Amino acid sequence: MVFRACSLAVVGALIGAIAACTSAWATTFVVPDTAQLLAASDTVVLGHVTAIRGLEAYSRLRTAVTVAVEQVVKGPQAAELIVVEPGGFVGRQHRWIYGAPTFFLGERVLLFLHRNPRSELETTFLGIGKFRVVRSSRGTEFVVRNLTGVHALAMRRGRLEGDSTVTTQALSELLQSLRALGALKTPAVPDSAAAQAPESALRQANFTFAGPPLVRWFLPDEGEPIAYRVSTGGDGTLGNDASVAAVDAALAAWSSTGCASVDLVDSGTVDPAPFSMCDGRTAVTFNDPFGEIPDPAGCTGVLGVGGVCWDSSVAETFNGATFYRVTEGDVMINNGFGDCPFWNDTNVAELLTHEVGHTLGLGHSSNDPNEPDPTLRNATMYYAAHFDGRGAQLMSDDVAAVCALYPVGHAGSVTLRRFAIVSDATGATPSDRLVVDGTLNVDDAPFDPKTDTLTIDLLAAGTSVFRLAVSPEQWTTDVSGTRYYYSGMTTAGTTTLLLSNMTAAGMRFTIRARDLDLSGTETDPVVIAITFGESSVTQPIPPLRNAALGRVYP
């Protein structure tokens, strides 16, 4: 398998890296059942979209969707409704709220709506409240809710489990269920406010509420940290200290992979600001202080939302593709979940780690509820939360994704032919053996053993568990000058290193080491870093499989 420090596309088996190139989803739902969704909604209507426009008012970017009503299922009668959703764009300024519903002109929809604190109608629990109506080839009408990309969970048997992100049901069956639950008993008095536009907008523009383009931070490329601020007070249940600790743990997890250039720092507290604002501050906010997320109902609803702001006039090239520069990334954790059995500092730390990953531009490792690949299913960036006690911890696929999107250096690539850790637990002292065979291909910074020190690091969870540095005078070479050999004692144990097939474009390397303590590699992720001169290549090791005497790849 080939890995490249400067290319997303070739991390082929590690799908999280590929997902990072497409979209970044950062909202976590505990999906309610039909009865809970109906109870949380003030209005339910069947209709079609006739207009969409972006709004900017009070520095908040939002989108107004006009719906011509065909049938009122619940709530006051109305011929037309205006639904206001968070996010949108006006001019060059864009704000994307992950998990908000997508609308298209002319589409037919079944909408569950509630009134927010500003008395505007918005979909209940963001994308959960929006169904698209489609017709089969046989003429049967279905409603489809597509939450693909969000962090979807459901409460079953007293615990949270991953929920399906796409649901389909016959329209007639859903309407019948709503009738059985007491809907369709609507007041005859028309809702005069339903078709009123939101408060006057400073600017307006046509807007199709679809997903963001490719977005990415470019600060790490410039050697700059990404500064996150934490709202004062913290979560109302966990308290300030536990909330800040969870945020800091999430930032540290993404900053300590050993192969990614991102440095996420806690730059202190900040007074809460509306989540829908693009104010230039990257922040983690607790308790939804401005009422921008629908309150939960029976431990269901929106756990947290995430979003990014970008300027459409600033586009840059990364790995041959056009990315817009992220100017701000935000996470907001909802209130009202404090009494739910899953709400504790460890699970909130996992939730924050997942959401912070999205603010970096990373997608999900997989959106498949039946994902057969354990590497993708176990990733913290899997579409469903694990809440298994991991807290702020990255797995191998998470590391592969962030290292592909934010590589350290662009010096070349590593082709790994064999990697094995052979363990012997019978002795009183550590006696693990390391076997590595691979090829280092360099781009425009060739390695010269006559002048450059070669350093090889094996990192587990960002910590070096094996390190070998060989300076020019330590090599033994053959007559042709194409094979270099080193043998000696290191602080870890006895090690030999052979370099062969030496060319300007690269070399083959073979490592044999014994009497090591490699117990740290039992926890994903594991990364190999090779440094020469002023260049370095850092690559995640593929997941190791258990063998007779240890763990190996392939």
Image (cartoon, rainbow, N blue to C red):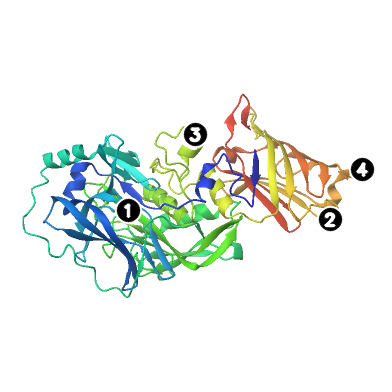
Q: Secondary structure at mark 4?
A: loop
Measured as percent of width and height from the top left, residue 37 is found at: 21, 47
Give the percent coordinates (x, y) of residue 280.
Answer: 44, 70
Q: Which residue is mark 2?
A: 451
Q: Nearer the viewer, mark 1 or mark 3?
A: 1
Q: Can residue 344 be seen in this snapshot?
A: no
Q: CA distance from mark 4 to mark 2?
A: 17 Å
In primary-sequence order, the first of circles 4 and 2 is: 2
Alpha carbon distance from label 1 to label 3: 29 Å
Separation of residues labelled 2 and 1 (CA atoms): 58 Å
Q: Nearer the viewer, residue 229 or 155?
A: 155
On screen, residue 86 versus residue 350, left or right, reads: left
Q: Which mark is residue 101?
A: 1
Residue 394 is situated, as x and y percent measured from the top left of the image, at: 50, 46
Which mark's residue is nearer the viewer, 1 or 4? 1
* Quarter of the picture holding the N terminus: top right
Do residues under tags 1 and 3 come within 8 Å of each other at their CB atoms? no
**Disc 2 to disc 3, C-alpha distance:** 44 Å
The residue under the point 89% across, 43% down is: 477
Give the amino acid at mark 4: Ser
Residue at mark 3: 373
